[in-house]
Amino acid sequence: MAAPPLLACAVLAYAAWYALRQVSLQISPIALAMLIGMLAAGLVTLSKDVSKEIGNLSKTILRWGIVLMGLQLDLKRIIVTAGPAVPVTLVATCGTIALFWWIGRRMGVSGALSVLVAIGTGICGAAAIVAASAPAKAKDEETGYALGVITLCGTVALFAEPALMPILGLSEQAFGFWAGASIHEVAQVVAAAFAGGPVAGEVGTVVKLTRVLWLAPCLIVLSLVLRRMEGGDGKEAKVPLVPWYVLGFLATAAIGSVVELPGVVRSTMAWVAGGFFVIALAGVGLGLKFGQILAFGIRPLLLAVLASLFIAIITLAWVMLVGWI
């Protein structure tokens, strides 16, 4: 029974890919696939069994995409190109996640949605959101909302930061660091950073990968915190200590750092991982209704905007006051 739902998700994913091929806008294919899935869900009524099967299939594909994403990491390249940036990105990433998880709760945003917005801003956008959705026990509509607002904020930054580069008088290295340390999606960072020049593109890409490096540690800490919160009332915690796909991500990251993989292998695996994300998010979209998303109101959007501004400002301040390293 997995073939028809998988085929449906693949067709919607192809529709998103084809649509992006026809326009020059820098829109995340993941977000577009989810949007197309939601539009399809409004036209076709799925049975409860089919919806459940699509949901389970989407989660499985997403998690394998996260595992494959680890092959993009090369610790040697990170240390050589932007080693001093590693502690800076750690502080900026962890500070953003902790602060805006807390602020989100004070704003009346649900705990799960606050976590997703904070971790999507702090680490790597959609991939971090879908990775954190399981330990956070987020509903599909919470995941969908977080994906939408984080993609929107990242798209704004994609165009705004290159426009600010000459105004702020940033060198290519400084701009590359800023873009890599503040913009959400890897693809958005690549597009924005290379707009500042080849050196900016190289620095931005590597700095962004240092943020991706913190995905597994942050998910492990998140799982530990949530287990403790659940166990605080005397009940047995149901949050897994370390999700299997986090261990898989760590394993592939180790392989990518120790083994000299050809560039074509890394690029192919990155393409496959991206394809998994697009197919899976098309399936997530099939299980969502626009009314479910709109019911959350404007507060989570405001939270995402504030978090995006925060990480952009603190990383820019570092560049302006200290330098890019």
Image (tube, helix red, strand yellow):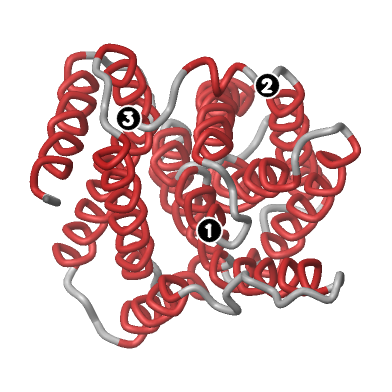
Identify the amino acid type marked 1. Ala
Residue at the spot of label 2: 167
Q: Is residue 40 left or right of residue 216?
A: left
Identify the amino acid type marked 2. Ile
Instruction: Write down the quadrant of residue 245 in the picture.
Output: bottom left
- The residue located at (39%, 76%) in the rendering is 253
Residue 305 placed where, x, y %?
71, 27
Give the SS element for disc 3.
Answer: helix
- Do callouts 3 and 1 mark residues in contact (Cβ within 8 Å)? no
Q: Dot 3: few (<14), some (14–19), or many (≥20) neighbours within 10 Å?
A: many
Q: Is 69 located above or below residue 322 in the figure?
A: below
Identify the amino acid type marked 3. Leu
Of the residues under marks 1 and 2, which one precedes in the sequence?
1
Residue 291 placed where, x, y %?
53, 15
Residue at the extreme right of the image, as rendered: 106
Tell me the quadrant of the picture where the C terminus can be found. Answer: bottom right
Instruction: Write down the quadrant of residue 310 in the picture.
Output: top right
- The residue located at (33%, 14%) in the rendering is 42
Disc 3 to disc 2, C-alpha distance: 43 Å
- The residue located at (20%, 54%) in the rendering is 272
Disc 3 to disc 1, C-alpha distance: 19 Å
Disc 1 to disc 2, C-alpha distance: 42 Å
Residue 95 placed where, x, y %?
80, 56
Of the residues under marks 3 and 2, which one precedes in the sequence?
2
Q: Is residue 10 left or right of residue 45?
A: left
Q: Residue 286 got which mark?
A: 3
Q: Is residue 116 left or right of residue 69?
A: right
Q: Dot 1: few (<14), some (14–19), or many (≥20) neighbours within 10 Å?
A: some
